[in-house]
Image (cartoon, coloured by chain):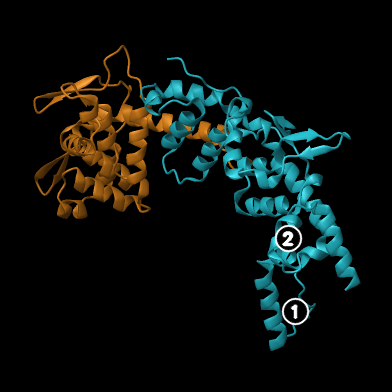
Chain colours: A orange, B cyan
Amino acid sequence: MVKINYNGESYEMKNQLEELTIGEFEKISNLLNNEQNKIEAYMDVFSILGVPQEIIDELDYDEFVSVINSFEFTAPKLEYRQSFELDGYTYVSYTGEEFKLKVKDMSLCEKYVVQNPEAYIGEMMAILFKRNDLTKNEHYENIHIKHKAKLFREHVTADIALPFIAMFSEKLIKNVVILKDELNSSDEA
Amino acid sequence: MKLNIPKGWDEVYVDDFLELRKLETDNFKINFSKQLAILSVITGEDEEVFEDLDVDELNKILKSIAWIKSQPSTEFQRKINNLHFKGFENLTLGEYIDIEHFISEDYYENLPIICAILYRQKRTDDWGNIIWEPYDNIDIWKRSEQFLDIPITDIFGIIQSLLNWRNEFMDIYQGLFQPEIPDADPDEELSEEDLIEEEKEQRLAKFAWAIIIDKLSNNDITKVNTITNLPLVQVMNHLTMKKVIE
């Protein structure tokens, strides 16, 4: 957390990945990636992170920049969390020695990316983290994924999601390159 | 998991090739769905078989089918089972008309049926002349099924050969294929009579072959089969001669 002082009052603001929920991280990522006006984008970020709007409007610019520089939204080391507990259930991403992304999971994740490029991380994590008391079919039901995605957005922190986001993006790009190079033959055939 | 992954087009059958072509035209928004569909077609395995693979393993498999980027060979077999390639120069009028129809739709999609027309049984008469299986005797739809279960490399090249031959053929007889629309100055407005004439020519172009057959048979429908079984070249030469005389 970082503290913002204004008129003798102190306001706490999240500035670490492990303090952000996945939902907050999605919104912040979209703002910072899409908004042309970066100052305006960061003002919206501050609002997402818990600072009242009237305080944001009155902040000293130098303090505004200083707080932005204190954000730590990258992970020093990308480790795939194997499991976590939430509401009495255990959610597991892999059971073997290391995490491996399955084709079925990748295919489903890609579907949600296509459907909503600005908010897919919740669904992606819902696909990758499986409840250990459900069958495979139950896990992949659309309603279950949607329900879990909402739950994860509200309660799972971004530091757990970030390694998976980075891995997914890397594999998606790599796979698209392979597809483009090796299966782009339709016009000739 | 042991997968039967083809190493080249010579291991892909015609029906699978047609499935692959269909996949290319389907609107896949998701790369992985398309990849799984392609792999399912060429290996004959359900998509579910690939779903449990690691993405990195899938990428290795995709790399091993890099050949799919190229075209199959443009050569083709002259003999498929007991059927022989008849040769374009031996086509009858009826065979040519049917081939024209199937080319105009989608010649790769119609490859089996085009082959059903072009490949026939043959025998030799007492004087050593080749006698081709009569076209009227064949159900080309049923015959086309024989061409689904063979490597695509056996017949893929026949389309390009056919198109090349067709272009030359139409060049030779171009006077017969163009509708007779009088030359006009593009800036000059056509008279009402000329417009009607032009529209008539364009409508008649749709029924050109039927009109030709009707004329050659002197409007006698019982002679239609005889006319359509005539060698194509003979018919075209006859029509050319008539046009010159007229």
Q: Which of marks 1 and 2 is in front?
A: 2
Quadrant position of the N terminus of chain A in the picture? top left
Snapshot quadrant of residue A14: top left
Q: Whole-percent x and y of residue A129?
A: 24, 26
Q: How many marks?
A: 2
Residue shown at 17% from the left, 24% from the top = A134
Q: Could you tell me which secondary element the residue under label 1 belongs to?
A: loop
Which amino acid, mark 1?
A: Pro
Considering every residue shown, the one lying at the far top of the view is A97
Q: Image height check: is B169 above or below A94?
A: below
Residue shown at 75% from the left, 55% from the top = B226
Q: Whole-percent x and y of residue B234?
A: 84, 55
Residue shown at 45% from the left, 34% from the top = B37
Q: Could you tell me which secondary element the residue under label 2 belongs to?
A: helix
Q: Whole-percent x and y of residue B193?
A: 71, 87
Q: Nearer the viewer, residue A21 or A11?
A: A21
Q: Which of B110 and A137 is in front in this view?
A: B110
Residue B186 image label: 1
Residue labelled with disc 2: B223
Q: Nearer the viewer, residue B132 or B52?
A: B132
Considering every residue shown, the one lying at the far right of the view is B245
Which amino acid, mark 2?
A: Lys
Q: Which of A84 and A189 is in front in this view?
A: A189
Label 2 lies in what chain? B
Q: In this view, does B91 lie to the left or right of A31?
A: right
